[in-house]
Image: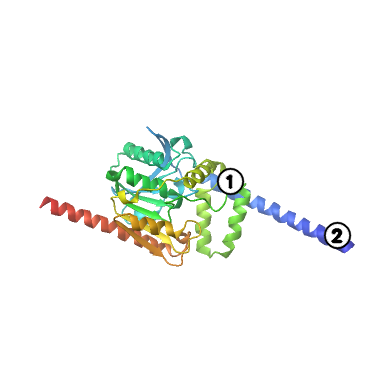
Amino acid sequence: MNWIKRFFVITLSLLGVLIIGLWISFSFWKKDAINNLPKVQLMNTENGQIEYDVNGSSDKYLLMIHGMPGSVHVSKERKFMKEGYTTVGVSRPGYYLTPLSSGKTPKEQAALYKSLLDKLKIDSVYVFGSSGGGPSSIQFALDYPERCAGLILYAAVSEKWEPLGELMMSDFVTWLFFKAISLTFDKEMKKEMNWYLKNGMFPKKSIINGFENDSFQFANLDNFPFEEIVIPTLLIHGTKDINVPFSFSQNAARRIPNATLFEMKGKDHYATITSYRDTIYQQVFNFLKNIELESSYKLNTTTK
């Protein structure tokens, strides 16, 4: 029996060393993530304080509404800037430096975005709402159509919905979980996932209020009057999405008068961290260019 005891002692010792090693690795990773968050700004508006960032010099603006979880730090998409657009990223209430008191409901959050645009003296934006950013993006299009040139919804929550699980109990456990699942990723996917984790999920205390509020709001979401959306709308959704049902976008596309649904056949919720993202962005750029061409045509025919 002594050899069995020795085996268990050795096994437990090795396991302990492994956990300690992982903890040390995580501690350096977390410190690096927190210390190297991009510099952003805070704005006091009539609807509350909001964390935001503006990137680009064009007068064509994209309001980037992040998912659940997320932050302003994940909104810096250089592809848009290269195509001649300026991105206006925000942290939704309860995430990072935007207090939950600035707006719990989708309607309150939409009003907060409008107040930010007023302060920035931006008259019109394209709205890009991802996943959990869907409800407030849809609400913005409904409440402020004169400020919304077009609506883009990526795998967006648009009906009553409950997250697949609770937020992990600790930063370390969350990090371990994503490290484990990333073992099946290729090099590019691992790089993208690591970037998202560093910019939109750590530390937990920076996102927990927003995450818990989203969970409550989405579980009690009112039915949107999609028929009242008057602006061009592009919905992008993977047919194999197990996070946010593909049927959400199908239903919304049927009801929104001027909507286009791009079905990502066989793709899941995380298609944007794969090489397929180039196809996604091309769909977005085609959509934006079509709006601009149509607007130019209407302007020319009006002035003749």
Q: Is residue 39 above or below residue 232?
A: above
User: Tag 2's secondary structure?
Assistant: helix
Q: Image point 87% across, 63% down: which residue?
A: 3
Circle 2 Cα neighbour tier, 10 Å, few/some/many (<14 / 14–19 / ≥20): few
In the foreground, 116 or 73: 116
Horizontally, is 180 left or right of 295 in the view? right
Verify CB contact (< 8 Å) between mark 1 and mark 2: no
Kind of residue indicated by mark 1: Lys
What residue is pinned by disc 2? 5
Q: Position of residue 98 (x, y in %)?
A: 46, 38
Q: Position of residue 72 (x, y in %)?
A: 44, 46
The reply to whether residue 73 is visible in this rendering is yes
Q: Position of residue 46 (x, y in %)?
A: 37, 32
Q: Is residue 243 above or below residue 36?
A: below
In the foreground, 7 or 246: 246
The reply to whether residue 99 is visible in this rendering is no
Q: Quadrant of the N terminus?
A: bottom right
Tell me which corner region of the image, top left, top right, bottom left or bottom right, holds residue 259: bottom left
**Sequence-wise first label, 1 or 2:** 2
Q: Is residue 265 above or below residue 112?
A: below
What residue is pinned by disc 1? 31
Q: Position of residue 145 (x, y in %)?
A: 29, 45
Circle 1 Cα neighbour tier, 10 Å, few/some/many (<14 / 14–19 / ≥20): few
Tell me which corner region of the image, top left, top right, bottom left or bottom right, holds residue 233: bottom left
Kind of residue indicated by mark 2: Lys
Of badges 1 and 2, nearer the viewer stands 2
Q: Image point 70% across, 53% down: which residue?
A: 19
